[in-house]
Image (tube, helix red, strand yellow):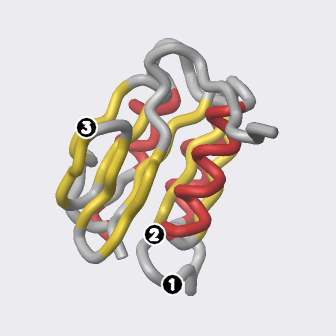
Amino acid sequence: MDVTPTLAAGALPVHGYGEGFFRVGEAVIQGPIFLRPSVVQAAPVATLDELTAEHITAICQSDPAPQVLLLGVGKLFDKLPAKELRLAAKAAGVILEPMDTGAACRTWNVLLSEGRRVSALMWPV
């Protein structure tokens, strides 16, 4: 029995990640990434500390707006993101979910297979 979830055409699951890289769909991307269901690109900032409320607002106002924004914060999830980031997502009606990058990759794939409107910013381990 095949238990591989069916993905929408063009959907880009995360197939792997490691020190400094992600494997998304058929591509290997170095550094932090920004994901939408069928788009992968470089993150707008190099580090989580550079991420601002304006970045979050822009992501949350994209069309279609995500229901959930995953933040893959690297190897360890040891602190919540800045309050301004959480408030910006909340004001846009988007759930901000910070977690370690491994958990974010797995959650991305599950939400993608469910057809959810999800975006993600992830920093490599």
Residue 57, x across and y down, in percent: 46, 35
- Residue matched to label 1: 76
Q: Amino acid at mark 3?
A: Gln
- Residue matched to label 3: 41
Kindly state the secondary structure of the residue where label 3 is placed. strand
Placement of the N terminus among the 4 image quadrants: top right
Kindly state the secondary structure of the residue where label 1 is placed. loop
Residue 121, x across and y down, in percent: 42, 50
Height in image: 50 above or below 75?
A: above
Spatial CA span between label 2 and label 1: 7 Å
Number of labelled discs? 3
| Front in this rendered view, residue 8 or 76 | 8
Spatial CA span between label 1 and label 3: 23 Å
Q: Amino acid at mark 1?
A: Leu
Q: In the image, 121: left or right of 70?
A: left
Q: Is residue 122 visible?
A: yes
Q: Amino acid at mark 2?
A: Val
Q: Are marks 2 and 1 in contact (CB under 8 Å)?
A: yes
- Residue depicted at 56% across the width and 80% down the height: 77
- Residue matched to label 2: 73
Height in image: 2 above or below 96?
A: above
Q: Mark 2 vs mark 3: give the one in front.
A: 3
